[in-house]
Structure formats: C-alpha cells, structure tokens
Amino acid sequence: MIYNLGSINIDHFYAVPHLPGPGETLAATDYRMGLGGKGANQSAAAAKAGARVAHIGAVGPEGGWTVERLAGWGVDTTHISRLDVATGHAIINVDVAGENNIVLFPGANWAMPAALVEAALAEAQPDDMLILQNETAHQVRAAELARAKRMRVLYSAAPFDVGAVRAVLPYVTILALNAVEAAQLSSALGTDLATLDVPEILVTRGAEGADWRARTGETAFAPALKVTPVDTTGAGDTFAGYFAAARDRGLSPQAALEWAGAAASLKVTRAGTADAVPTAAEVADFLGRRG
C-alpha cells in the first residue's frame, strides 16, 4: 500500500513560442486546464501503474473535480480534506520544444491540518510506503510517523529546498532527485551524494537515463528511451510514481528503473500532467511496439 502526502494543483497550461524572459510579454497560442501538483501526479502514476494508493491532501471550494479525477483512477481519496482556502494552482508555460517553466501558488496544500496526516497514517502497516514532496505542510511529522511504523519513505526533493531536505532526510529510505537537484544538494551540503546516510538514492537524468544506488554499494542504471517530446511537465513525477509502484510490488531496482523510465518516456510524448500519465497497459503496449 502506498500513502502519498501530496500536493493537488489546478494546472493552467499556456503554449508559447519560447519561454518568456524578464519583462517579456508573450501571446500564448493555446490554453488548457488540468489536474496537477507533484503529489497528484505521483498518486495518478502509482495508481495507473496498478498500486493501491491513498492520497493525503487538501483542496479548496473549487477543487472538488480534482478529487473526483483522482478517485476515477482508483486513488483512495478518503483523506483529502475540503478547506475554505483556494486550491493550489500552477501557471505552466510550455515552449515548442516541450520545455517548461512553472509558477506555483500553494493554497490548500499548505493549509491542511496535521490531524489529517495523523489519521491517515494511523491505518498504515509496516512495509507500506509513504511518498513525500516539497509542496505540502507536515512533511517531517508524516515522515516521523511513517518510520515509527517501519514504513518505507520515498522523498522527492522537489521543488528543491535545502532546509526541507535537511529536516526530512533522517527519515528517508529512498531519496529521489533529478540531476539538477542532485547537484544542488551536493553543493548545499558540501558532500557527494554517495556519502549521504540514506539507504537508497534515485537520480533521474532526462535523456541520459536514471540511476539508483544503495548504501550497501549495489547500483542499477536504465538508459532513457528515445522519443520526440511534446511536454516534459510531470515526467519526473510519472517516473517516481511508477518506481514507487514497482518497489511496492517487490520488483528489483533494475526492473523498477526500466518500467518507470518507459512510463516517463511515454508521458513526455503527451501534453498535460496527471491526465497525461499513461496506464500500465499503455506502457506495456509502448514497450511492445519498440520491440
């Protein structure tokens, strides 16, 4: 079972000829709205991968449809609170090459009560997994409760905040970063990632693939599959959700890397975030067509 203390955002997508520079005004060529937030994306990915997922989070009065969307993918939404605070939202500019920049408003994600987290994790069992990202309140409390129950804790250190990483790191069993975040963390801590006292470290490197290493010295690597990107938003979340689902099923780190990499590669060929995350059947078909 996977529990995800995660953000829920309403994503506003703007297609632009290039990412805007300082003081620049651009006319968007297209606009769409969808479900996003690193937490919602990862819950969607894990559920579409076939895992049992319970999402812990909060939305505002206008966010009811986001909860319904998650439930439609099989996510347990019992522990999503409805608050009198606006649902988190993101403004996402996507250029013609599929690259993006994002502005976040946290909203209800940072207003949820600690009691919500405590009630949700009261049901958890040893060897269940807790997923965390840096877009909600009560991360440290959740991580403490999880480790007290002997749960595994997969922490995506994004958006990067060294203070948040320092606070959560003592409870983390799987640290997930992209290449930029890995470099930022190494610089901030003044040490190589290999020296961190974390059981497992997962680093995604975009077109260069992804690697995993354990404190025991064991390693795994999976190259990226070549695709033509349409929208890279949510690719890392897709990878993390599929990787979590794979490990929850008992797959090896190598198999988990390969499956998650295929899911992320397929995702970037589609526009959108949580709605664009592929199902396990779609990933299997994608891999089958590639031989």
Image: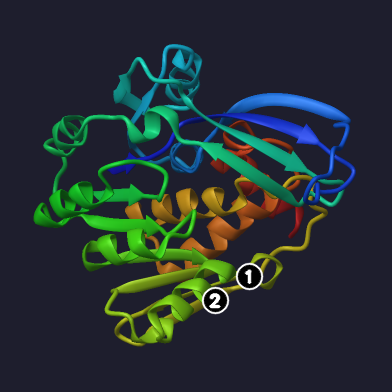
Q: Amino acid at mark 2?
A: Phe
Residue drawn at (84%, 38%), measured in percent from left and top?
25
Judging by the rendered image, the residue that carries numbered circle 2 is 221
Judging by the rendered image, the residue that carries numbered circle 1 is 209
Task: Name the secondary structure under disc 2.
Answer: strand
The one of 237 and 164 positioned closer to us in this rendering: 164
Q: Amino acid at mark 1?
A: Gly
- Mark sitting on residue 191: none
Residue drawn at (60%, 39%), measured in percent from left and top?
277
Residue drawn at (19%, 35%), measured in percent from left and top?
114
Horizontal and vertical percent position of residue 112: 29, 30
Q: Quarter of the image containing the N terminus?
A: top left
Q: Quadrant of residue 207?
A: bottom right
Q: Quadrant of residue 106?
A: top left
Task: Name the secondary structure under disc 1.
Answer: loop
The one of 255 and 192 positioned closer to us in this rendering: 192
Question: How did the renderer colour the structure?
Answer: rainbow
Horizontal and vertical percent position of residue 56: 31, 33
Q: Compute the Cα span from label 2 to label 1.
A: 7 Å
Determine contact: label 2, label 1, CB under 8 Å: yes
